Image: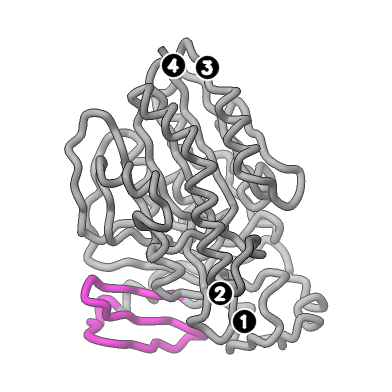
Amino acid sequence: MTGPPVTALITIDTWRLDHFSASHTPRLWALAGEGERFDSAWSPIGLTSPSHATMLTGLMPWEHGMEANNHHGYALSASIPRVMADDRWTDVAKGAFVSAYPAGPEGGIDVGFDVFDGPDAGERAGDETVGRAMAWLPDNQGAFLWVHVYEPHGPYEGTGASDVERYAEEVRKADTVLTPLVEHLVARGSTIVVAADHGEVLLEERCGRQHERSTSDHVLRVPMFRWTPDRPSQVYGGMTGLEAVPTLLKGGMPQPGAVRLAESGICEAGCSPGCRPEGVLGRDRILVKPSGARAVLRSGVIHTHGEITAAEVAALQAIPAVSAPGQPNLESLRQLGYSEP
Ligand SMILES: [Zn+2]
């Protein structure tokens, strides 16, 4: 006996959808095959703090206000309800075990957890995070658990000759370090929701390894699935996204969306120095349709590809602008090769 069921959210940072497969992530792919896999799941932004805030609140970044990482000074207000505040988890222990600072407590992601465990700075290995989570899980009662691993995020470690090869090694390592936790949660008959916060740019864009500025499919379209002991397996093809994570944790199903809305992040320290897109300190907003048609709002100008209606353009323009809580470090950005907008 390993204990009562747990409600668990497992997030893998920077995990591309094309690296979710039997060869890249064998344990998680097998688990998804027994569960409900969401084949058109989208992140609202290629940044760790805001994307996780969306998974914990069900709100888009421009709704919950944490539109960039915590080290830029962005925060998630304590007054915004988190999913684990739901009545069904009133009497269970709530623990979060994260592997990198942007998923950490700075900025208020920790509000609502009884235990929040992460590195004080930088990142730590996923097996340490998983080990701490498994040591914490109570064996005599249920729990609400969030575990975050960071292996696929750059810089990529491994023996491969290229970034592409080492990235694949890091994804495989994330699957390996999560396997003992997955086996434990399955044995307890738990509800398990697994998702990436965003994908990654490998070779597709001239900016190089820079998911935070991208609104491309390989950054915004992400792996997402749920496993429970009692629901039939299926592949769900409707457009949905990370804001559905609270619904999934509570046992519900998302409603398919007619369009997806998302936005780019702002530039991080460490953006590729050779990348100088127009308006690098601003944001792009994007609308994507199931057909693949899309509209991008950049610096006040709409760019469209495929069939986009006037109403869809209006929806994109209606996304509210949320002002930054502080000033970006312009001198630091200049040193990295960026110009002011
Ligand atoms: Zn991330």
Distance between the Cα atoms at labels 4 and 2?
43 Å
Q: Position of residue 102 (x, y in %)?
A: 64, 53
Mark with earlier residue (3, 2): 3
Please say if the residues under marks 1 and 2 sit with CB atoms less than 8 Å apart: yes
Amino acid identity at mark 2:
Arg
Q: Position of residue 22 (x, y in %)?
A: 35, 54
Please say if the residues under marks 4 and 3 sit with CB atoms less than 8 Å apart: no
Distance between the Cα atoms at labels 3 and 2?
40 Å
What residue is rendered at 62% in x and 27% in y?
115
Residue at disc 1, secondary structure: loop
Q: Nearer the viewer, mark 1 or mark 3?
A: 3
Amino acid identity at mark 1:
Val
Distance between the Cα atoms at labels 4 and 3?
9 Å
Q: Position of residue 30 (x, y in %)?
A: 32, 45
Residue at disc 4, secondary structure: loop
Residue at disc 3, secondary structure: loop
The span picked out in magenta is 285-312
Quadrant where ligand 1 appears = bottom right
Q: Which residue is mark 2?
A: 213
Q: Nearer the viewer, mark 4 or mark 3?
A: 4
Q: Which residue is mark 3?
A: 138
Neighbourhood count class around disc 4 (C-alpha, 10 Å): few under 14, some 14–19, many 20 upward: some
Q: Nearer the viewer, mark 4 or mark 2?
A: 4
Q: Which residue is mark 1?
A: 280
Q: Quarter-wise, where is residue 332 in the image?
A: bottom right
Amino acid identity at mark 4:
Thr
Residue 312 makes an appearance in the image: yes
